[in-house]
Image (cartoon, grey):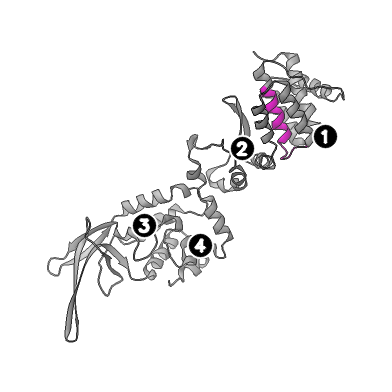
Amino acid sequence: MALTYKGKVIYLANIVSIARAVGNISPKEIEAIKKIQESIGAGKIELNKAYKAAESPDYEINPVGYWSDKVKNLEDVIYVSMIDGWITDKKKQSILKFAKQINLKQEQIKYIAAFFTPGFARVIQEQQKAPFNSTCIKGKKKWYLAAWPKEDIFQAQKLIENIRAINKRKVYVDGVESRWDEVFGFFWCAGERNSARRPMEYCFGPDEKRLNIWGCKQAMMEWTKWSDWFGYGTFKNTGLVNKQVCFVFDKKRIRHELEINLLKYRFCPYLRFNLIEAVLKELPDEVTPTDNGPWIYKRDYNDSPGSIRVKVKTADGKYAYTDDYYSSGVAPKSVVIGVDILKKAFKSCGYNIDEVKGLLEYKG
C-alpha cells in the first residue's frame, strides 16, 4: 500500500530533519532528497511541507507506514546522510535512534553502524563520482550502483580499492554478472606500470630482461628459447630433392592461449588487442630451423606427441659425433627477431616509432 499524502510529508521530513542536524543541508543532500521525493510519488507541496516541519526545533523522528516503508525510510536517511562522503556523530546518533524506533534487531543495528566506518564513507564518496550512480532495492536491501564505459573503467580505481573489504559486492559487464577478478584483475598490474620508471618497458618485459612481443607480460608467452608457445604448430617436410624440415606455427592456438591468459586483464587500458593481431600477422607462418639460421630446433628431453627426432652430425678435425635429440618446436636464436616483428607491428598499427624507440633498441 502506498504512503498517504500525510505519510509522504512525514517520510520526507524524517530525512530532512536528520540531514539538517548540523545546520545547513548541502547541495548534494538537496538533490538526493529531491530524487527520493520523486521515487515515493510525492510532489513539491509535500516536499515543502516536509522542509517546514523539519525546521521546527521540536520535530521528532516519526516512522510512518508499514514496516517495509519504515526500513526504506531509514535506508534513505542513511543514503542522504553519507552522500557527501562523511557523517557527523550527531547524524549517527539520530540514525541509530531511528533504527531502534522501528524495532530492528541488534544484529541489524550493528550492520547499520558498520556503514559509518571511514572506509564505507569513502566508498560512497567515490561511488558518487561515477558517470552513472544511483541506488536500488534488491532483496529488501539497498544497493549502491556505479557504472563506467568499458574504456574508462580504470577511473574506478579508488572505488575498487576502498570496496575490497566489503563482502557483498557484484560487478556486471553488459548487463551480465561477471567474476570480480576477471574484470578488475588488471588493476594491480596497471598500478605497477604507472609507477614504473619506463612504463612501456614494464609491459613489454625489458625491465625484467624478458621480452614479450604481445605488449603485456601477463600473456605469459615470452620471447625465450624455453617458451612453450614456440612449440604450438607442426613440422612438415619440404622440397623434393633436398628435403628440409620446416615448422608451421599454429596461429589459431597461439591466439587462443593469448585470449585465455589475458581474459582477466582484457579491460586494462594499456592492452592493445589490435597490436596483438598485428604481431600475429607479422610472425612468420613457417620457419626452417637450421644450425646457422635465425631459428633452431627446440630441444626436448623426451619424445612427445608431434615431436620429431633430430640428428646432427658434426666433424671436428679427426673426430666426428652425432647430436641426437627430440624436438617439439623451434626457438629463436636472439631477441632481434622478436624486436623486428614488433617494429613491423607497431608500424602497421600507426604507432609513432619515436615513442617506442627505446623498446626497439632492446638487445636482450
Q: Is residue 75 magenta?
A: yes
- The residue indicated by pointer 2 is 132
Crowding near the residue tagged with mark 1, few <14, some 14–19, many ≥20 C-alpha atoms within 10 Å: few
Marks 4, 1: nearer the viewer: 1
Give the mark nearest the N terminus, 2 or 4. 2
Type of amino acid at the residue the image marks with label 3: Leu
Left or right of residue 221: residue 68: right
Give the mark nearest the N terminus, 3 or 2. 2
- The residue indicated by pointer 1 is 22
Identify the magenta region. 71-88
What residue is at 16 percent from the left and 86 percent from the top? Answer: 318
- The residue indicated by pointer 3 is 280
Quarter of the picture holding the N terminus? top right
Kindly report the distance in space between the C-alpha atoms of the residues bearing marks 1 and 2: 29 Å
**Residue 231 shows up from this direction:** yes
- The residue indicated by pointer 4 is 202
Q: Secondary structure at mark 2?
A: strand
Kindly report the distance in space between the C-alpha atoms of the residues bearing marks 4 and 3: 21 Å
Kindly report the distance in space between the C-alpha atoms of the residues bearing marks 3 and 2: 38 Å
Location of residue 31 by image quarter: top right
**Residue 216 shows up from this direction:** no
Type of amino acid at the residue the image marks with label 1: Val
